[in-house]
Amino acid sequence: MEIELDINPGIFNDVYLPALNSEIRTQIRFGGSSSGKSYSEFTMAPIWAMQGHSILIVRRNASSISKSVWLQLKKSIKKMGLSEFFKIDQSAKTIECLVSTGCIVTAGIYPDTERLKSITPLEDDAFSKIIIEEATEITEDEYNDILLRQRGTCRFKKTVTLLFNPIFKKHWIYKKFFAPIEDEYDFNADAKQYISEDLWILKTTHLDNKFLEDEERKTLEGMKSTSPYHYQVYCKGNFGILGTLCLPNVIEREFDPVALRLESLGINIGIDFGFTNDPTAIVFTAYDERNRTVYVFDECGGKGMSEEAMVVGIKERLNFYGIRYYEAYADNSSPRIIDRLRSLGLNVNGAKGSIMDGIFWLNQNNIVVRPKCTNVLEESKLYTYKKGTDGEVTNEPIDKYNHYVGDGLRYACVNKISDQKYIGSNKKF
């Protein structure tokens, strides 16, 4: 069945329109936040599927697919008035075109990395298009595994597109695609685009997004004074130069947890276990998602703490602030201690996730810490990246000064880091 599409080009930002018909093998669309990269890509995807393309859209964390990719795909189909031409499988996260052999398959790599090997198009032998959302989250080995999903014959020229906000020049994506051309194309200066026979790099910022609200623009521009590093990366779309501090965005500032109504945001507590050599570190937080701010309002801990002492310390602080509902997350490598804390009445679960995922997420937010949280503040000034034998800063944190900020704070935010919405616990202490 042939369908003549009449798509209004006005639904796209002009800078992305050439992507609709591009057949360049590797395509990179990167830059600042809210530049419309993902919106344009996932609005084009249904059009490509109607043309017969089999499309694989990948993001590292499987839980992120529903929150970002899947929702945008469904909205785009509805907005363009194309719902009757697609069969949407909510559970399998696949979209089948009813007027062609095209399809859209979405998948997360983590935690089920083996599942990627079994993903195939619904009808074709190979995916003609692969789109990698938040490509900086994946490793180079994972990238190569993803490309294997394009093995086989295909009626179209195969393309792979990487979407991301730049992080730092030590990242494998920069080394692989940008370093070979950096002498001629400086994307941290005036370069906006690079095109060759097999590579297209396009840099955009919020200024390229005609659909963005003024309030969002002001938030991005406001980073210039609150966090120069994040202003360069998330507003200007520049690759950051990795500094030595793992969390340079920690801000010491007094605030009243009750006046800010932190409990309405959801109280999360992170617990890093220690005893003889290392302290037990307990960090009390709330997260303002709209303003992308982590509030650290209290802490407790110390060496030689028993499970009973941990629970007493936590409950004393919750009582002091009048907090009834909370969730606590602790090092999941110590299930015995977690079970003991539960038996003492603490609402606590094991925290999962990598250190680098946690640092990456925390660095996308402001971290506001009250002066009384002296351990968090002290560690934030000492928690740094290792240096290599050449004296250059690596992207691996040192295994020191990481009890309160490296682990305790990361555990407290684990349900945000894994892209899961906060669901307030009904359990009281």
Image (cartoon, rainbow, N blue to C red):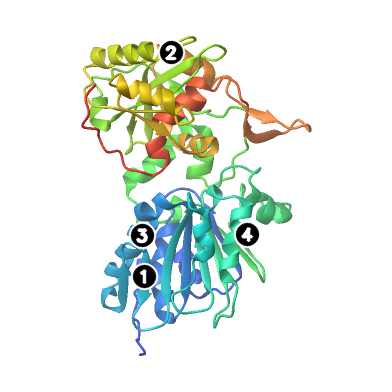
| Whether label 1 touches label 3, CB < 8 Å | no
Name the residue beneath numbered marker 1. 95
Left or right for 31, reference 282: right
Precedes in sequence: disc 3 or disc 2: 3
* Whether residue 270 can be seen here: no
Image: 427 above or below 201:
above
| Residue at the spot 43% in from the left edge and 75% down from the top edge | 122
Precedes in sequence: disc 1 or disc 2: 1
* Whether residue 288 can be seen here: yes
> Considering the numbered disc 3 on the image, is that residue within a helix, a strand or a loop?
helix
Residue type, mark 3 in image: Trp
Task: Give the percent coordinates (x, y) of residue 37.
Answer: 45, 58
Residue type, mark 1 in image: Ile
Which class describes the residues within 10 Å of circle 3: few (<14), some (14-19), or many (20+)? many
Name the residue beneath numbered marker 2. 301
Q: Marks 3/4: CA distance?
A: 23 Å
